[in-house]
Amino acid sequence: RKEVEQDPGPFNVPEGATVAFNCTYSNSASQSFFWYRQDCRKEPKLLMSVYSSGNEDGRFTAQLNRASQYISLLIRDSKLSDSATYLCAVIAGNQFYFGTGTSLTVIP
Amino acid sequence: EAGVVQSPRYKIIEKKQPVAFWCNPISGHNTLYWYLQNLGQGPELLIRYENEEAVDDSQLPKDRFSAERLKGVDSTLKIQPAELGDSAVYLCASSSTGYTGELFFGEGSRLTVL
């Protein structure tokens, strides 16, 4: 079983829509959680960390559910520039695990 | 400040040939990682260095892959001999102290093995 699992999508949404991604992790002792963004043929870049209490950064909201072992990313009022692949990442057992990524395309 | 620098950006070789990738991390970053990323997949760790010490190389296929970080700064990853299945993007990343959460990635070296 993979340490981190994501729905690969693709998600195709119109501009202005709200879209949510989920990511599940298998190790209940996982310590830290993140969302990275990867543009086509580019390197991954940190989008935001995910805190137990949930956190928001503009149109982006990240949440952690330890009981069900998943993290989520909500994007409100989608922009064309949000089109990318969103990777969740988990630190467990002193190792960094990435999900396969969820592809998002925002359509005009 | 310069980011993580990798070279070459692209490499095309025939199978059974050797290939080497170079990475220069962000200045002052003690931790360096080599990841492999296949199309449609997330990055998978190959090896992690703390300064010059390889602290996690459990996923490195040691029969054909080798890596070094002799002076605790830049690093090289070598494949010899390359196989068709090695075609992928090899990403180098660095962080300031262990797993702080933000890995800074280089642009990657895209390998095609024919």
Image: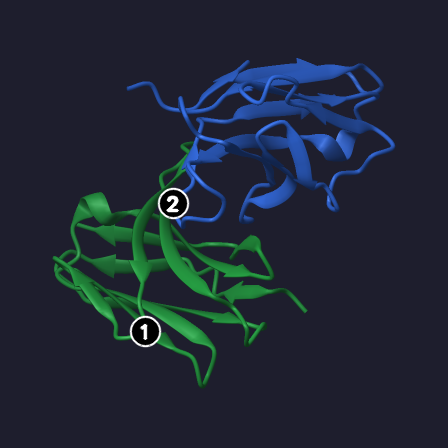
Chain colours: A green, B blue
Q: Chain of mark 1?
A: A
Q: Position of residue A81 (x, y in %)?
A: 20, 43
Disc 2 and disc 1 in contact, CB within 8 angstroms: no
Residue A39 position (above or below residue A15): above
Name the kind of residue labelled 1 in the image. Ser
Choose top left, top right, bottom left or bottom right for residue B32. top right
* Vertical placement of residue B97 versus B27, above or below: below
- The kind of secondary structure element at disc 1 is loop
At which x and y percent is residue B66? 76, 26
Dot label at residue B102: 2
Q: Quadrant of the C terminus of chain B?
A: top right
Separation of disc 2 and disc 1 at Cα? 17 Å
- Quadrant containing the N terminus of chain B is top left
Looking at the rendered structure, whether the residues under marks 2 and 1 are on a common chain is answered as no
The furthest residue to the bottom: A67
In depth, the one of B46 and A15 nearer the eye is B46
Which class describes the residues within 10 Å of circle 1: few (<14), some (14-19), or many (20+)? Answer: few
* Mark 1, residue position: A52
Q: Is residue B48 left or right of residue A103?
A: right
Mark sitting on residue B14:
none
**Image coordinates for residue B53, horizontal then vertical, percent:** 66, 32
Q: Secondary structure at mark 2?
A: loop
Name the residue at 55% across, 23% down.
B109
Q: Position of residue B9 (x, y in %)?
A: 51, 17
Q: Residue at x 68, y 35 (%)?
A: B54
Chain hosting mark 2: B
Instruction: Compare residues B29 and B81 and report the one nearer the observer.
Output: B29
